[in-house]
Amino acid sequence: MEIFIQLMYLMAFSLAGDSISKAFGLPIPGSVIGMILLFLSLQFNFLKLEKIETVGNFLVNNLPILFVAAGVGIMTKYDLIEDKIVSFLLICVISTIISIAIIGKTTQVIKRKREARKEAKKNAK
């Protein structure tokens, strides 16, 4: 029963995101809005992580399975994208490089700030 309740929490956020997206005619998918709402709820302690942790871990551990349908969909419509495949691959490579660079820089900044805080605490003693 606990897993069902946890799944219902996630579904409620998804439904809320879809409702907001449709009600305001936003160009952002409802699932993305739902994820943002879930993040904000966890960040501001409206929802405790323990209330969704088991289902969340299950979904993250089985994430590759969720991409199978998208991959099959692309393969069944390959004739429609065949002439644009080079553009798609180029976009994927460039966006991956940009993402890695941004994540790396962000990690370095956070690490420096944490080390500076540790050093300040150490010097304060």
Image (cartoon, grey):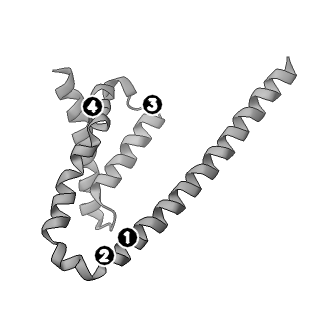
Amino acid at the residue labelled 3: Asn
Kindly identify the residue that appears in the image at 58 percent across and 57 percent down: 101
Q: Which mark is residue 89?
A: 1
The CA span between labels 1 and 4 is 30 Å
The CA span between labels 4 and 2 is 33 Å
Binning the other alpha carbons within 10 Å of mark 4 as few (below 14), some (14 to 19) or many (20 upward) gives few
| Outermost residue, top side | 125
Give the SS element for disc 2.
Answer: helix
Kindly identify the residue that appears in the image at 41 percent across and 66 percent down: 92
Q: Which mark is residue 81?
A: none
Screen quadrant of the C terminus: top right
Q: Is residue 22 above or below residue 55?
A: below
Kindly identify the residue that appears in the image at 87 percent across and 23 percent down: 123
Q: Is residue 55 left or right of residue 73?
A: right
Q: Earlier in the sequence, mark 4 or mark 2?
A: 4
Amino acid at the residue labelled 4: Phe
Q: Which mark is residue 45?
A: 3
The CA span between labels 3 and 4 is 22 Å
Cβ atoms under marks 1 and 2 closer than 8 Å: yes
The CA span between labels 1 and 2 is 6 Å
Binning the other alpha carbons within 10 Å of mark 3 as few (below 14), some (14 to 19) or many (20 upward) gives few
Q: Is residue 105 left or right of residue 86?
A: right
Of circles 3 and 1, which is in front? 1
Amino acid at the residue labelled 2: Ile
Residue assigned mark 4 = 58
Residue assigned mark 2 = 85
The CA span between labels 3 and 1 is 40 Å
